[in-house]
Image (cartoon, rainbow, N blue to C red):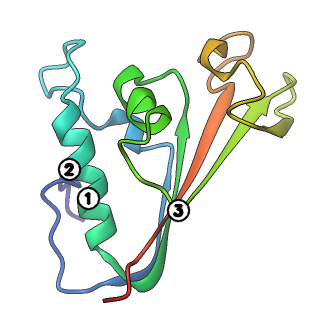
């Protein structure tokens, strides 16, 4: 097993499918665990992920909203480009979710950890490999 930062991960293999479940929100925090967030590291991590996808391959990424404010900003302002974007809102303590629209909801005010423990809004982004 290797512990390699996604920004530094290189592979001769291209993948048909990459799935990242609630992991990318941890990228960008400095290794000294301060509250500083490295925006360029976040952007570079997504560029590297996209480079690992085969032509016409897919990368599915879930990210809890309001856990990493810089990542949220990059997503909302479309500085990270996804082919498809979905938003889910948690509606019960028993972990029920509904799909919501970014423009029709008060997504910016949904808090991580409130009213329910953990994520209360989840972003699902799909990256596609580019045919050259």
Position of 96 compared to 59: left or right?
A: right
1 or 94, which lies in front? 94
Q: Position of residue 120 (x, y in %)?
A: 69, 24
Residue beneath disc 1: 47
Residue at horizontal 22 percent and vertical 32 percent from the top: 39
x and y percentages locating residue 9 in the rendered image: 17, 63
- Quadrant of residue 108 in the image? top right
Quadrant in which the C terminus is drawn? bottom left
Task: Check the image and report above or below for 121 versus 7.
Answer: above
Q: Disc 3 to disc 2, how far (Cα)?
A: 17 Å
Asked if labels 1 and 2 touch by Cβ distance under 8 angstroms, the answer is yes
Image x and y of residue 99, in percent: 80, 41
Which is closer to the viewer, label 3 or label 1? 3
Few, some or many C-alpha atoms within 10 Å of disc 2 (few <14, some 14-19, many ≥20)? some
How far across and down, in percent of the image, does residue 44 sit? 20, 50
Label 1: how many residues lie within 10 Å, few (<14), some (14-19) or many (20+)? some
Residue identified by numbered label 2? 44
Image-based side of 109 in relation to 62, left or right: right
Between 87 and 93, the one lying in front of the other is: 87
Residue at the spot x=37%, y=47% of the render? 80
Disc number placed over residue 83 in the picture, else none: 3
Q: Secondary structure at mark 1?
A: helix
Which of the numbered marks, if any, corresponds to residue 90?
A: none
Q: Is residue 100 above or below residue 56?
A: above
Confirm or deny contact between disc 3 and disc 1 (CB under 8 A).
no
Q: Quadrant of the N terminus?
A: bottom left
Tell me what residue is drawn at x 48 percent, y 56 percent: 82
Between marks 2 and 1, how big is the CA–CA gap?
Answer: 5 Å
Would residue 83 appear left or right of 109 to someone viewing this image?
left
Mark before the other along the chain sequence, 3 or 1: 1
> Hey, which quadrant is residue 72 in on the image?
top left
């Amino acid at each position: 097993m290797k512990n390699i930062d996604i920004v530094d991960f290189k592979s001769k293999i291209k993948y048909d499918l990459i799935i990242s479940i609630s992991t990318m929100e941890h990228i960008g925090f400095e290794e000294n665990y301060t509250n500083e967030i490295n925006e360029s590291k976040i952007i570079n991590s997504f560029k590297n992920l996209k480079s690992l996808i085969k032509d016409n391959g897919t990368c599915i990424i879930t990210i809890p909203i309001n856990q990493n404010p810089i990542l949220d900003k990059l997503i909302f302002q479309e500085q990270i480009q996804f082919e498809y974007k979905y938003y889910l809102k948690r509606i019960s303590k028993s972990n029920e979710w509904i799909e919501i629209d970014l423009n029709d909801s008060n997504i910016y005010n949904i808090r991580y950890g409130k009213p329910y423990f953990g994520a209360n809004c989840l972003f699902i982004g799909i990256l596609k490999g580019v045919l050259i």
